[in-house]
Amino acid sequence: MINFLDRPSLLSKGVYLQVPVRITLLDESIIRSNEPEEVLTYKYNKLGNRFIIPWRKIKGKLRRLVLEKQRYYNIEPSCSLKDDLCMQCPSCFLFGGTGETSSANVPYNILSRIYGETFISEQPAEEINPYTANAVSERDLSTGQALMTILTVPKETTFLGVVTIKDPTLEMASIIIDNLKRLTRIGARSVEWGRVKTEILGYHLSDREDLSAYLKMANIDVDFSCSGLQNETSFPSIKNSYETLNVQVKELIKSLTESN
Ligand SMILES: [Zn+2]
């Protein structure tokens, strides 16, 4: 039987915790075609036309949340995104980083342990109502030359996707799950994107990635309520999880840099 790792590992041991997630839009959201990373639509052979949210959009927000809460517990509080990763904290260990390009300037890289997939709307995107508007410059509110296409995603649209934690300890899982539940907005342009509700549908521990939202919606051999679900109450508290993982990560990094 597959189990959580006792300690975080530098080298993969081939364990995957998969967490199916449903995101519900509480506000109508806007797609602008000149900023294609916001939300898109995609035509699937089996599902037809669907709204999709690219994984990097969700991952970026999740990473921000994990880092915020870590600062609240005063763990590497100056670690920040882009060029100022500390490369030795729970957030850097979970989401990865490149040593030489961070201000920490360390001789190692960290691979992300958090994988995801495109989130797909459960409803077909039939009610797409595109119209073209003049782009308005934010600086002077004058109407520019560029035309942009605006699509709206109706409120109450729900999206399914699976978040995967590779080689998880209970502490790593606890941190990701706690912060997934705090995901109440998506995207940098929070005003336009509006609020969301994020629900965890289950936990599935395996030696492979069994689950995917696409397979589930296309009715291909996937059951989100499958056996192997872990009881959430077995996760350690969020504060303990950060503090334990922080110590473990620093030990790992120390063993890595001393052997060089
Ligand atoms: Zn860090």
Image: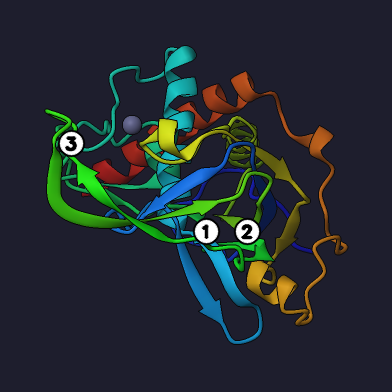
Q: Quadrant of the N terminus?
A: bottom right
**Residue designated by label 2:** 162
Q: Residues within 10 Å of mark 2 (few under 14, many from 20)?
A: many
Helix, strand or loop under label 3? loop
Q: Position of residue 114 (x, y in %)?
A: 49, 52
Amino acid carrying label 1: it is Gly
**Residue designated by label 1:** 116
From the viewer's side, name the closer residue of 200 and 249: 200
Amino acid carrying label 3: it is Asp
Q: Is residue 116 visible?
A: yes
From the viewer's side, name the closer residue of 36 and 11: 36
In the picture, measured across the screen, residue 151 lies left or right of residue 18, that is left
Q: CA distance from mark 3 to mark 1?
A: 23 Å
Amino acid carrying label 2: it is Val
Tell which circle, 3 or 1, labels the residue nearer the N-terminal end: 3
Q: Position of residue 93 (x, y in %)?
A: 41, 42
Tell which circle, 1 or 2, labels the residue nearer the N-terminal end: 1
Q: Nearer the viewer, mark 3 or mark 2?
A: 2
In the picture, measured across the screen, residue 96 lies left or right of residue 62, that is left
User: Which image quadrant is residue 176 in?
Assistant: top right
From the viewer's side, name the closer residue of 94 and 120: 120
In the picture, measured across the screen, residue 95 lies left or right of residue 174, that is left
Ligand 1 image-quadrant field: top left
